[in-house]
Every structure is written in structure tokens, then in C-alpha cells.
């Protein structure tokens, strides 16, 4: 079992992670935004705001660590994450790995072999990202919908090679509530133990049978888009999460929100006039992007109303992140 985990400020004991949000983002920049003359990025102002938000999360809700699984090509900036971590007092774990085919996978890396991609991942974990010396603490894998493409399978196979060589966990993105069982099968084919994988965004599927397939497969399951209401009502997320807890699977659930603090340029999709007006109004109140505290202020009461206890929440937010980073087996 691992006793240490890579953070952007260096190795720390796994036991020092404490209360951890396993899938949040600080900054996102989709490829091409850098060519938009209207896209502005105030780096110093962004860092100040990110520090404020993370400090609020730590002070008000006891969050000590945050995993930012930003894909390499979506504006990942390890040096900026390090500065934010140092100033906020929140540990940040960053990842190596690319996004899914429809919205990522740069042409250069599409042409590389599985082994060449894995070599990059391993180097970022063991030596550091670029010349920063900052080492990734997990591997990001992403697949699209409705099926996993052949190209995505190559990148997933590379992640398997890198996981087996490095021992760090895998954190995934699934799209539109599909692909989780397929990811699990491909990880198994690649020789990766199920409990070393967090299958992300499973709360995008409303079917409890889908969730049961994931936990029965032995992976951690991500209810990690809490608060993204255009994809799923939180009442549905709360119903399904509470059901998994009642059925005895609290040791496999990870809760997070997939939120961001800043975004270069426009969103990756066209927004309606009504959506833009709502975002502008919230931004004027200092509430856009939405705060990381939502899960505690709004979602936790929904869980408690459904019988989820503080002890259950502690397992999901404190024990499960420590266990996946240590590599410890799931409790029997």
C-alpha cells in the first residue's frame, strides 16, 4: 500500500489528506479559446479568487484536500495550482491524462502509440510536469457517448500501463451517463484492479441498476456532478446516493461537484439568453461561478432528509479518498 501521495506542493502522507473533494476544477481552457481576442484572463485576480473560495471551503466545512483532474489539454497549469494551494492551505492533487475524443485528444498525441502515451503519463507522475517538478498524483481517463471509441480505448490502455507502473489511482470522466461498465471491463483487461479506479459522473444516469453494476464491479463510483442541475436534478442524485448507502455501499461512493473557479473565454456550448442573464446576475453578486460550498450548504440536507448520517458522510469524504490513494482494498 502507498503511504504518500503527490500533491502540487510535494508529497504528503496519505493520512494527511483529510476531508477530500475528489473531482473539482479550478481553471479550464478548451482548445482554441487562446485565439479568441475577447477571451481575457487576469491570472493574479483569478488566483486571489480561487484562494478565497478554497479558504472558505476549508474554514467553513473542514475540507483539507481537493483533486483537480483537469486533462492536460484543457488548460492544466500545475504552477498556478501550486500557488493557489500554498496560499489557501488546501492540498491540491493534479492529474496526468487527456480528455475524450469529441472534445480533446490533441492530434500529436492521437498519432502516438499506447506505449508513448503511457511514457508521458509515467514521467509526469515520477519526474514532474514539464520542467516544474510538480508530480501528478492520479491519472485522468475520459470517454464519450454513446460508445467508447477506438481512439479512446488506446488512451485508456495507456492509462492502464501507467497505473500498473506507478501505482497511482485512475479517475474517469463518463459522458451522458453511459460508459461506466465498459470502462471497468477495459481496466480489467488492462490488468488494473477495480478498487484503484473511480468511475466518474455516474450520477448523470438516473437508473439505480446502472449504479449497482458499477459498485458490484468493485470500483469507486462518482456522484461528482452535484449541483449541475441541467444534467440531473439533485433530488434524483440524493435518492440514488441514499439508496446505495442503505444497500451497504457507502465505502465505494465519492461525492464531489465538478465545479470550476474560472474559465477562459466562453463555455464549450452555446448558452441561451436566459442562461446568460442568470450567469451575469450571479456574477454581479460574486456567486458565479457557483461556490464549492454548495455541496455542504444545499446537498447535504437532502441526504440527511433521506437517512444518510454524518458517519456515512465521513466515510465518503474522509475514508474513501484516503483508501483509493493508499491502494487499500475495499472493506468486506
Image (cartoon, grey):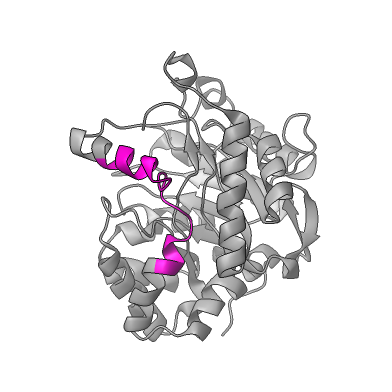
Q: Any magenta on residue 292?
A: yes
Residue at the image point whose x is 36% and y is 86% from the top: 307
The location of residue 13, given as percent across then percent down, is 78, 64
What x and y, as percent, mark residue 98?
A: 53, 37
Q: Is residue 254 magenta?
A: no
Q: Residue at x 42, y 68 (%)?
A: 297
The residue at the point 44 percent across, 13 percent down is 37
- Tell me if residue 190 can be seen: no
Q: How many numbered tags mark residues here? A: 0
Closer to the camera, 151 or 127? 127
Q: Is residue 114 above or below residue 165?
A: above
Query: Is 236 drawn above or below residue 126 in the view shown?
Result: below
Say left or right for 11 vs 308: right
The magenta span reads: 278-297
Pick the quarter of the image with the C terminus: bottom right
Asked whether residue 142 appears in the rendered view, the answer is: yes
Instruction: Please give left or right for residue 200 compared with residue 212 in the image.
Output: right
> Residue 1 at what x, y percent from top left?
75, 68
* Residue 221, placed above or below residue 7: below
Who is closer to the viewer here, 276 or 16?
276
Q: Give the percent coordinates (x, y) of residue 36.
A: 43, 16
Q: Quadrant of residue 294?
A: bottom left
The answer to whether residue 57 is left or right of residue 120 is left
Q: Which one is nearer the viewer's eye here, 170 or 77?
A: 77
Amino acid at each position: 500500500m502507498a503511504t504518500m501521495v503527490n500533491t502540487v506542493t510535494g508529497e504528503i502522507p496519505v493520512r494527511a489528506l483529510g476531508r477530500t473533494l475528489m473531482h473539482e476544477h479550478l481553471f479550464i481552457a478548451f482548445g482554441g479559446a487562446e485565439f479568441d481576442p475577447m477571451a481575457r484572463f487576469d491570472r493574479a485576480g483569478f488566483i486571489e479568487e480561487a484562494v478565497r473560495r478554497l479558504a472558505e471551503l476549508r474554514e467553513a466545512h473542514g475540507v483539507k484536500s481537493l483533486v483537480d483532474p483537469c486533462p492536460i489539454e484543457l488548460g492544466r497549469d500545475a504552477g498556478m495550482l501550486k500557488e493557489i494551494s500554498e496560499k489557501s492551505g488546501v492540498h491540491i492533487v493534479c492529474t496526468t491524462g487527456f480528455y475524450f475524443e469529441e472534445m480533446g485528444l490533441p492530434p500529436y498525441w492521437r498519432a502516438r502509440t499506447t506505449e508513448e502515451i503511457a511514457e508521458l503519463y509515467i514521467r509526469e507522475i515520477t519526474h514532474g510536469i514539464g520542467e516544474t517538478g510538480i508530480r501528478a498524483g492520479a491519472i485522468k481517463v475520459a470517454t464519450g457517448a454513446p460508445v467508447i471509441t477506438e481512439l479512446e480505448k488506446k488512451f485508456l490502455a495507456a492509462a492502464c500501463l501507467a497505473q500498473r507502473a506507478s501505482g497511482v489511482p485512475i479517475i474517469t470522466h463518463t459522458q451522458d451517463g453511459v460508459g461506466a461498465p465498459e470502462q471497468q471491463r477495459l481496466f480489467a483487461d488492462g490488468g488494473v484492479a477495480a478498487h484503484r479506479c473511480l468511475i466518474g459522473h455516474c450520477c448523470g444516469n438516473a437508473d439505480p441498476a446502472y449504479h449497482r453494476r458499477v459498485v458490484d464491479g468493485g470500483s469507486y463510483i462518482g456522484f461528482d456532478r452535484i449541483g449541475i442541475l441541467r444534467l440531473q436534478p439533485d433530488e434524483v442524485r440524493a435518492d440514488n446516493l441514499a439508496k446505495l448507502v442503505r444497500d451497504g455501499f457507502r465505502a465505494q461512493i465519492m461525492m464531489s461537484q465538478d465545479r470550476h473557479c474560472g474559465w477562459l473565454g466562453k463555455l464549450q456550448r452555446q448558452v441561451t439568453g436566459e442562461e446568460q442573464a442568470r450567469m451575469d446576475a450571479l456574477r454581479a453578486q460574486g456567486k458565479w461561478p457557483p461556490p464549492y460550498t454548495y455541496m455542504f450548504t444545499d446537498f447535504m440536507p437532502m441526504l440527511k432528509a433521506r437517512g444518510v448520517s454524518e458517519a456515512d458522510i465521513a466515510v465518503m469524504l474522509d475514508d474513501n479518498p484516503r483508501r483509493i490513494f493508499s491502494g487499500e482494498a475495499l472493506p468486506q
